[in-house]
Image (spheres, grey):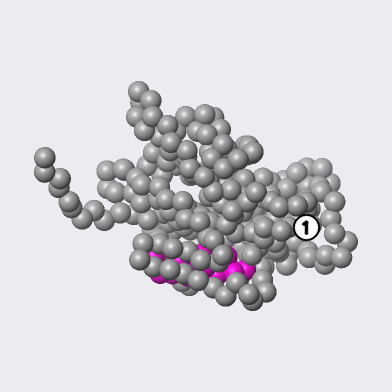
Amino acid sequence: MKVSVSKNKKEKVVVLSDWHVPFEDKKIIELELAFCKEEQPDIIIFHELHDFYPISSFEKNPERLDDLQREIDLVNVYLERFRKACPKSRFILLDSNHLDRLRKFIWKMAPAFNGVRALKIQNLLELSKFKVEFKKEFMYHSVLFKHGNIVRKFSSYTAKGEWEKEGTSGCSGHTHRLGIFFHTDRSGSHVWVETGCGCQLDAEYINGIANWQHGFAVFGFDKSGHFYPTVVPIVNYRIDWGNKTFTVDAKKST
């Protein structure tokens, strides 16, 4: 039996999620930036970059002086750096539960401001400056990219739950865990990926050890729509990708 080997140029889609600025791990973001600069993805999908900490409904640390504009500005510094590193990449920001904090806050505290155009997410975050598209979710070929709203106890359990809910292959964040779930039935083979996070693993609102993992996802698509998903863990501030290794000094403070 002869096995054929051919070169097959693929579109590369990188998914970066759950930075939760100002609770991001700066070293993780630097690694993700270096990876994207090296690989030059066709599409970079971001979600949950902002925490919207000042308008959350949870108890807040009174010592924190962060305000909403400062948080937005911090994220925009990152977006500007990613845009300079990947000038030809398509940028997409997905809607998420933390961005939805703004809607909930306005509806509860200032409903008269609901129709103000300047407060729409796209305008408030100044996404046009960095050529970022804002979408609730994004279907690319046969893969659904979304932030997600299911949280289950272990890695890949949420991926299974998202697949059961959506009935299609896909990719989500929200859990801060890395995982991948496969399923085959009469309609074919399916996969769902959990993308990990770029936030600090010792956030102030977590007691004990958080079952979270740093990392992201990469999808390769060929012209036929066939795709190959990869979970990319970041362990001890190191990314291994093929014959490339990306590292950053883990001893330096975030």
Residue 30 drawn in magenta:
yes
Q: Would you call the spot at circle 1 few (<14 residues within 10 Å), some (14-19), or many (20 or more)? A: few
Which residue has dot 1 on it?
Answer: 204
The amino acid marked with disc number 1 is Glu
Point 34% across, 45% down: residue: 227
- Left or right relative to 159: residue 169: left
Does dot 1 land on a helix, a strand or a loop?
Answer: loop
Identify whether 249 is placed above or below 229.
below
Q: Main secondary structure of the magenta part?
A: helix
Point 57% across, 57% down: residue: 214
Residue 211 x, y percent position in the rendering: 65, 49
Residue 10 x, y percent position in the rendering: 30, 54
Identify whether 22 is placed above or below 46.
below
Stretch in magenta: 26-39
Query: Where the N terminus falls, by quadrant?
Result: top left
Query: Where the C terminus falls, by quadrant?
Result: bottom right
